[in-house]
Image (tube, rainbow, N blue to C red):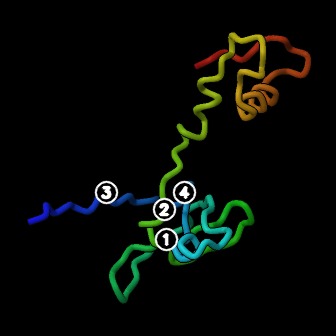
Amino acid sequence: MAPQTQPAVRPQTHYRKGDIVLFRDAEKFWLGQPGHTFVGRVERSWTNTHNGKLLYDLTELSGSRARAGIDPDYMRPLPPADAMRDIDTAPLSEPDTGAMTPAAVAWLRQHLAPHSSTLPARH
């Protein structure tokens, strides 16, 4: 008798209005169609009256397009800490900005005085 394998169970994540998420349109993905994955902002959650499943309405951030009835099984959170890690870990002691990611360099340029040669203090 072959051993039975347990399916991978992912804990249910509940999203709040304003959360940034990654969404994948499963049909487009499996059919190899373009535009199957996008970054979105949660606008609201609601329960489908036919099956009782919690669904979400998102705004696709790349074009401000509204997307309704999104299944959370195809959503993943994009935590702020991940988005800011490159800035938080930028090698500020390095004289060569080539060692930093473009996002870290852009942040530094925005936060430095136009003629200042000092870097902002790390918190």
- Please state the horizontal and vertical placement of residue 65, each as a whole percent of the image: 70, 71
- Tell me if label 2 and label 4 are in contact, CB under 8 Å: yes
Which circle marks residue 35 in the picture? none
N-term-proximal mark, 1 vs 3: 3
| Amino acid carrying mark 1 in the image | Tyr
Mark 1 surroundings within 10 Å by alpha-carbon count, few (fewer than 14), some (14 through 19), many (20 or more): many
Q: Disc 2 or 4, which lies upstream in sequence?
A: 4
| Residue receiving disc 1 | 56
Q: Which residue is mark 4?
A: 21
Q: Position of residue 66 (x, y in %)?
A: 65, 73
Calculate the distance from the C-alpha at mark 2 to the C-alpha at mark 4: 6 Å
- Of the two numbered discs 1 and 4 in the rendering, the one whose residue sits closer to the viewer: 4
Q: Secondary structure at mark 1?
A: strand
Q: Which residue is mark 2?
A: 75
Query: In the figure, residue 112 lies in which quadrant?
Result: top right
Badge 2 or badge 3: first in the primary sequence: 3
The residue that label 3 is drawn on is 11
**Distance from label 1 to label 4 (Cα)?**
11 Å
Q: Residue at x 72, y 61 (%)?
A: 62
In contact (CB < 8 Å): disc 1 and disc 4: no
Instruction: Tell me which residue sits at (60%, 63%) in the image.
Output: 37
Secondary element type, mark 2: strand
Residue 82: percent from left, percent from top: 54, 39
| Horizontal side, residue 53 vs residue 91: left or right | left
Question: Of the residues shown, which amino acid type is indicated by label 2?
Answer: Met
Mark 1 touches mark 2? (CB < 8 Å): yes
Mark 1 and mark 2: Cα distance apart in space: 10 Å
Per the image, label 3 sits on a secondary structure element best described as: loop
What's the residue at 77%, 22% (across, down)?
A: 98
Gap between marks 3 and 4 measured at Cα: 16 Å
The amino acid beneath tag 4 is: Val
